[in-house]
Amino acid sequence: MTVIRLALVDDDPLVRAGLALMLGGAEDVEIVGEAADGGEVEDLVDRVRPDVVLMDIRMPGVDGLTATERLRERENAPQVVVLTTFHADDQVLRALRAGAAGFVLKDTPPGEILTAVRRVAAGDPVLSPAVTRQLMEHAAGSAPDTRRSAARARMAVLNEREREVAVEVGRGCSNAEIAAGLFMSVATVKTHVSRILAKLGLNNRVQIALLAYDAGLLETDGH
């Protein structure tokens, strides 16, 4: 059994204690460290080498957004799941664009938080299609006019098949669903996703989805 090394970052010691109690009891999760401020995160990661960081997005010192941006710029960075009280706001979007693998609400049941940690450790984003669409709609209301042209310029490096896969990722489809819809094997889909990430300099599928939306590639989806 692979044990997930998890670090907790929250300025409230009671929240950290509660998360440690809820998540540390799982056989496949080990709480390897805690921090009370985003400014402590890089040192914490260097010391304990977590697989996943559960990060509060709002802290009085260095916030979780800044800490996420700093972490995801590093080589071999751990996956980040942000903790928030809002489904969609500018800070959540910025964290996802910076490379966070998803987010969970602070009032999410413990079992669902544990599932989110496991999914992220396995390389899967923690965003349902419904939540993805909600974020997209929020992004549409806050995006600058230049974002679409910039996104289209970035997407231009993809070939036609990669662009098709990127659109399906943006619609929230799994690899199996993409394979069935585009008549290819799951292994081929995984290869395309890996190439898309490399060509666009992205960290995960959530960023692919946001970039595809910014480029206007999902508008035929009816959302």
Image (spheres, rainbow, N blue to C red):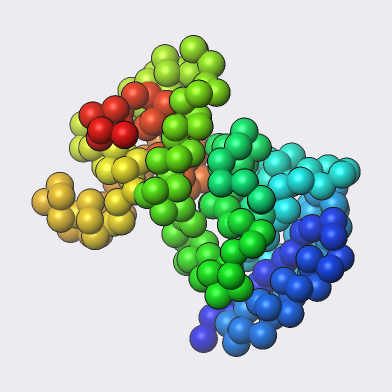
Which residue is depicted at the point 48% across and 66% down? 119
Q: Is residue 208 left or right of residue 86?
A: left
Residue 188 location, x and y as percent?
23, 54
Left or right: 152 as drawn, with respect to 50? left
- x, y percent for residue 98: 60, 39
Residue 121: tell me if it is visible: no
Residue drawn 62% across the image and 33% down it: 90
**Residue at point 61%, 84% (across, down):** 26
Q: How many marks?
A: 0
Image location of residue 144, percent across then percent down: 53, 16
Q: Is residue 110 visible?
A: yes
Q: Horizontal placement of 54 versus 79: left or right?
A: right
What quarter of the picture does the C terminus occupy?
A: top left
Q: For this rendering, which residue is in front, 10 or 137?
A: 137
Viewer-closest of 218 and 4: 218
**Which residue sits at x=63%, y=78%?**
29
- In this orientation, which residue lies closer to the viewer: 75 or 105? 105
